Image (spheres, rainbow, N blue to C red):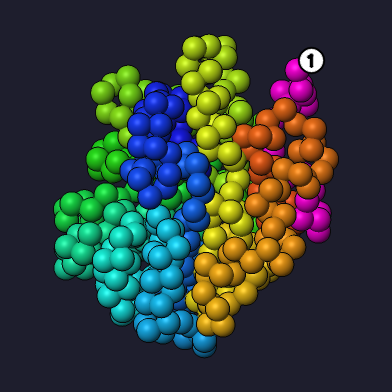
Amino acid sequence: MIGISKLYCGGVEPSDVLRYGGESKDLPSHLLQFSSDKRPVVVWNLTRRCNLKCVHCYSSSQNVRYADELDEKQGRALLKDLADYGAPVVLFSGGEPFMRRDLPELVGYAVERGMRAVISTNGTLITPAQARIYASIGLSYIGVSLDGIGKVHDKFRGVEGAFDAAMRGIRNCLDAGIKVGIRFTVTRANVDQVPAIFDLAEAEDIPRLCFYHLVYSGRGSELINEDLAHEETRRLIDLVMDRTRGLFDRGKPKEVLTVDNHADGPYIYLRLIREDPDRAEEVLRLLRMNEGNNSGRGIGCVSWDGAVHPDQFWRNVVFGNVKDRPFSEIWEDPSNELLRKLKVKKRYVKGRCAECRWLDICAGNFRARAEAVTGDVWAEDPACYLRDDEITKEE
């Protein structure tokens, strides 16, 4: 994640991180990406079943019962292991997590074990009663996927009325006092909706916006030709920066992030060099703390069937299964060559990435996207939109 509000608008300073000591167990949630120990945030896709038919779904979910999902007892064992291991956050995802009846018990157990629990959802199943339950449990955050306004969103989600249902879910969360945010995956089919999403967040007083770059995984692998061209991506990031700055300038700040393309960090820095050189140097320090893509190190994923992946998109790579041994043991196993290399991936990336001046703060960007396009785990990420003159090492 690249915090536009944190970096570009001064929402976070390097001293904020140092004041807490820099370790994930001590940091508040908005500073976790700058932790020094990089204990993994773990995405648990606790079910594959979903009530929608999203065109870019990385898990290719359907509204059917899937075999081999971890049951509640196995889920509690997973959560206990994650807590004992020191994972600071568990993100309950799917499929659609609200389709599991034991979700409140599992979220509550994670909170009891000292972890921050968040939910990623399509929002359509969140009733007022459910929102109150999760507020009482101590849920930290709910991210609701919106990929446009009205029929644009419905088309992405494959179900008429999905937008209105998601908005009811968002409002129910806000009414219950739960921090809620919008998760927006950008393609050519909906990039024109970004200004309207900013307007919606302001009108509804939604405190957080996350803009996701497309990752070619699951049904999303069929949308490669719908991904933005590099110049389109640059215009998008400039727009997101401008709109975020506008909110801050009008005294209505929101937390705004981009996700899944770490070229955004250097791009912000290069713009700040032109606009505010002093702030640019502070941002560079924060980007170095962030360290770029952390698949296989600072983020991991457990599938509905217990398989362990380097992140939630890279599903063809499996390191082991929590039904056989704990996540913590799998994650620290030095005998797994790919996992071992991912923890120091900067040594292995190729192409433009290997020579890039920003390698230390990008870490080669998204390996799943590189593999999807080239078949080579270590190839350069095709979604890097930085120009050659911007990545050349200074003499």
- Residue at 41% x, 77% y: name it: 77
- Residue at 46% x, 48% y: name it: 184
Location of residue 318 by image quarter? bottom right
Question: Is residue 393 inside the magenta stretch?
Answer: yes
Work out whether residue 70 or residue 37 is closer to the camera in this orientation and state it. 37
Work out whether residue 156 or residue 356 is closer to the camera in this orientation and state it. 356
Q: Crowding near pointer 1: few (<14 within 10 Å), some, many (20+)? A: few
Q: Position of residue 54 (x, y in %)?
A: 51, 64
| Image quadrant in which the C terminus is located | top right
Residue 165 shown left or right of residue 36 in the figure: left
Residue 385 shown left or right of residue 166 in the figure: right
Q: Secondary structure at mark 1?
A: loop
The secondary structure that dominates the magenta segment is loop
Work out whether residue 132 or residue 357 is closer to the camera in this orientation and state it. 357
Q: Amino acid at mark 1?
A: Glu
- Residue at 30% x, 60% y: name it: 114
Tally of numbered tags:
1
Q: Position of residue 138 (x, y in %)?
A: 22, 59
Position above or below: 329 against 258: below
Q: Which residues are magenta?
A: 373-395
Q: Position of residue 110 (x, y in %)?
A: 32, 66
Position above or below: 378 against 234: below
Q: Position of residue 42 (x, y in %)?
A: 48, 61
Q: Is residue 168 visible?
A: no
Work out whether residue 47 or residue 24 is closer to the camera in this orientation and state it. 24
Position above or below: 299 against 158: above
Question: Is residue 57 inside the magenta stretch?
Answer: no
The residue wearing badge 1 is 395
